[in-house]
Image: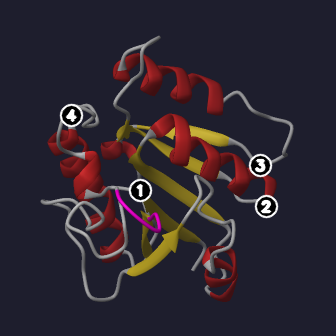
Amino acid sequence: MHTAVLVIDVQQGLCEGPGAAHDCSGTIARINVVTQSAREASVPVFFIQHESNAGYLKNGTREWQLATGLEVQAGDRRIRKTTPDAFLRTELHEALQALGVQDLVVCGMHTEFCVDTTTRKALALGYPVVLVSDAHTSAGNAAISAQQVIAHHNATLTNISSFGPRVTAMAHHEVRFAD
């Protein structure tokens, strides 16, 4: 097994309220297509959940739960994290190594934080990354819209070459897994 899918921070609290990420339902639907295709090819799927010690995204709260509509299967794995980097102080890297994973498919929420940081760390650890270009999202910020954040990261992350491994951006319907 050479590939794994990382679904980063697709949590209920990021899909509601005034700070909700852009197009949550569409993003979730596209993630579901990717994860279903991965499972059909026996590719492991990891759901990464951000958590805080108190308040927003506290472990076990409604907001911390995986988002409504996200399809999760019994064989999928879950990783809890407390920083934007899904590798930092988690068992993710060790779990990937134990499975013989050599490359990653990344999608999720809060592009400019957790998707970006985890993708860059994956490159630093030697994993080439397919960034699912239409299956990561943001709430935007005071300077740029969510759509601009997404487009910026699709362009920027694919231009990083200093780590060796590269990021390739692909739309959800272009992502293929070998059986």
**Res. 105 visible in picture:** yes
- Taking the spot 19% from the left edge, 68% from the top edge, the residue there is 71
Q: N-terminal of the two: label 1 or label 4?
A: 4
Marker disc for residue 165: 3
Q: Of the residues tagged 3 and 1, which is closer to the observer?
A: 3
**Residue that badge 2 annotates:** 125
Q: Residues within 10 Å of mark 4 (few under 14, many from 20)?
A: some
Task: Please tell me whether mark 2 sits on a helix, a strand or a loop.
Answer: loop
Q: Quadrant of residue 163?
A: top right
Residue closest to the far front = 54
Horizontally, residue 25 falls left or right of residue 106, namely: left
Q: Which residue is mark 1?
A: 176
The residues tagged by marks 3 and 1 sit, at their Cα atoms, a distance apart of 19 Å
Which of label 4 and label 3 is nearer to you?
4
How far is mark 2 from mark 4, CA to CA?
Answer: 31 Å
Q: Residue drawn at (69%, 66%), measured in percent from left and top?
A: 88
Q: Quadrant of the N terminus?
A: bottom right
Does residue 138 sit above or below 75 in this rendering?
Answer: above
Mark 2 or 3: in front is 2
Q: CA distance from mark 2 to mark 3?
A: 9 Å
